[in-house]
Image (tube, rainbow, N blue to C red):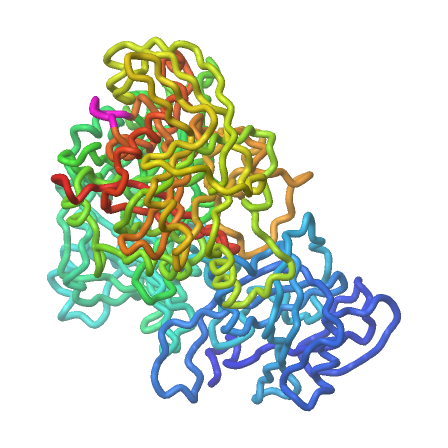
Amino acid sequence: MSGELGQPQAGPSHAGLDLPNPERNQAGVPGGVIRRVGGPGRRSWIQKVLEQITDSPRQWVTPSEVVPVAVLAVQRYLLEDEPRDVEPKPPLYCYDVTISDGVYREKCYLDPSLNSLVYKNILKVGIEMKISKVSCIYNEKRLGQGILCIDSVHCGETLDAISLETPFRNRAHREVPERPLRGGKSHYLALWNNEDPYGDIWLTNKQPEEHNFNDTRIISLSHLEMTWSNRRNFPALLVRILHKSKLRYYGKPDRKMIEPYQTFLEVADSSGTVSVIMWNALCPEWYKSLRVGLVLLLQDYSVKKSYPFRMQPLPVDPQIKLISTMEICLNLRDPPTNIIIIPERQVKPEWRLPKLHNRFITRSELDHVPENHICDVIGILVFVGRVQRSKKKESREDFWSYRWIHIADGTSEQPFIVELFSTSQPEIFENIYPMTYFVCTQLKVVRNDTQVPKLLYLTTTNESRVFIIGHRGHPYTNNTKVKNFIQWIKTKTDAGEVKNTVIGGYYPYPPVPETFSKYSSSVKVESLLTAISEVRKEIEDLQYREQKRIAIQGIITVIKYVPHKVATASAPASETPRNANRPSTSQASKRESQNQERDGKHPDDGPSVAQGINTSHESLSPAKKKRIVQGPSDKQVIVPQPEPSAESKGNKPATPSNLQCRGSTGISVQGKARKTISDRWESQLWREKKLGLIHHLRYSSVHPESIPRKFIFEHRNFLTQQYNSQPAKYIPPEGRPAKLDDFKSARSLGHFEITILGLNHEIAIDVAFLPMYSPEDIRTSQIDTLLTCMNYSCVYPQEGPGTDKVRSPRALAGDIIKAVTELDKVHIVCILDICSLGNNKAEVYLQRIYRPDKTS
């Protein structure tokens, strides 16, 4: 099947070729005939493999010598249905992997059976990789052309640095724009979502140009609405862009479209506002050049009846008529649309084009804004979470990319909490960090005042746009609230008061409702409860940075407090499990899980030898005591030191008791009745059942990338990269590579490892609980058990006056452990967040527990 003029043909499009003289300064060979030629200098492993496969009678070979290569790029695209396919397949995304052997680069096709390595972020840029089986896919419509296909690999460690000076062996692989190796598609997609423009087909060079209107006939939108059905030719439209949507990719294997994109523009003149749809190849040409506020002259467009189920955004001016009966269509052909950007200096007052009107609100006003209200915000970023992904539909390969951010504007002690989805602005979405001035438009208010704690945050809409670099030239600069913010932030930065900002880590939001009935009504899933036997499959099915919330039933049988590490500590091997010899196939994840499910004694089943230390007397006001945790906080507290590592334990446990507290020294409370509560507790039920388990799932590790870090501006590039998604192309590190563990944690409290036993006593799962508490965020005076305290953990502790009045982390940990002892043998419902970090690393966090035996 031939593609359109100037586009690649279906099937393999680039040859696997040898160089006549394999010197590093050679420019490569053109895509032509596969041939073998010797020469002086270092031999290329890639070239030797191609020689071996061309000499082989089979279509695949095992390289005679397996040499590590570096991965420089992993690029995704949609592969069209082959002519032999009878039934259309679901979207099948393919990957081209660019490797370097130190002499040449080569772009190779990754066999779809290995796609899971990309899904799990095992095969990624910057790693060392050994290829143990390759094949060649030939283009039968061209003489001697084929591509190298990777059929079996072992993925190894991340390399400290990779040279980008190595040339492509095949000249065709460095053509601009880049073309996928297979199929008729002309471009690559973003690696982790379909909304972001990616690659060199997306132009940014469209500039305003003067236009002579003497011979141009213009029609108003209201007049066009009344007459379009009786017209064959339409006069020009002179409009201003009021809103611009993110991109929509609608490619499917059975659709023979080169660039299947769509975006909506809401435009207006003095008579009304209407939706304009830009289709296909016009999107790469124009999307990045068009912005809200520009004036456009549109010629040779088409008009059709509007789609009945699409909701248009509200007009910026309530006086402007909303035209919803028709849509303007812009295409590269049928007819070929002519778009001209009119310079603002040429815009005449008599045209009466509408001005832009922003809907800025302050954080203090947000408390009184109704649900679903659309607004704009401006502020300084004080928290930027890591990029996460959520599946658009089950059984599909398409994901949304999003992250949580906090924005402060000086009008309230509370920040805006924003769920920021990708807005087709990757140059901003992937480069935001704390201490940046930030504007986000067209946000929707999400609130639930009946939930405890009250649910209140903002989320992006289809028309949301974000801005971070300066504000000059933007129409909102004259807004009063914008001026007030700029004045406030100027006084803060001049005084050096902008600090304590945080980046990255696991972010437990939105909070889980306080009752199970409210939780049930808030989720949209086929099955409300997940059997504990199905949890492992749920986790294994997660893709890179995917996060999901599930509910299981069980019994809490073990809890252990793990203090956070000092900033200079290196990550232990258990936190960064990598094995260069691990078979990196679809079985890798299963083997990892099987290793984590070894039956028998848990490393922590042996006796602990914690030693206690005295803490200072804590003086809290009665109100402050109730706000944090009800308990004997006015008593002297003896807190144990952390236990030795699990690897140092091996002795058999001591004699059990019904509510057993481990450790030679516990949290001792002085008073009429003396109690001792350790930093680890296990129940009698656990001691009876743990050796007879069928499976013990272990997901309680908290990896370095899940710990929020205090932001250091001088290291912004490194920190930003760590909490972004894995890039599609290799980016050399700046200077000596740093480690996340070198940066101070933003949490003063450590985490808990909790073991939940299934109701049938056959399967147990270890999960983590991260009480990232902040006294300023607590909105209740009834935090006296684990059931209530765990739901108030969304904002990180701030340093400053009054912080020393808050209970110490170890004291608070003791109260949480004490609360767990009250749940011995109680059947509970646990709300869990399951997260995939990629590279066979997964985490499970306990978010909330409910007691079915009580009203919930």
The image quarter in which residue 492 lies: top left
Q: Is residue 241 above or below residue 669?
A: below
Q: Is residue 9 left or right of residue 854?
A: right
- 746 within the magenta span: no
Q: Residue 793 or 516: which is nearer the viewer?
A: 516
Q: In this view, does 737 lie to the left or right of 454?
A: right
* Highlighted range, magenta: 778-784
For the point 56% across and 68% down, the residue is 96
Q: Residue 235 or 161: which is nearer the viewer?
A: 161
Residue 741, position as x, y percentages in the image: 57, 35
Residue 390, position as x, y percentages in the image: 35, 54
For the point 36% across and 48% down, the residue is 688
Residue 677, position as x, y percentages in the image: 37, 26
The image quarter in which residue 48 lies: bottom right
Q: Residue 427 or 57: which is nearer the viewer?
A: 57
Residue 483, can we see it? no
Q: In this view, does 282 lie above or below 781?
A: below
Residue 671, position as x, y percentages in the image: 31, 12
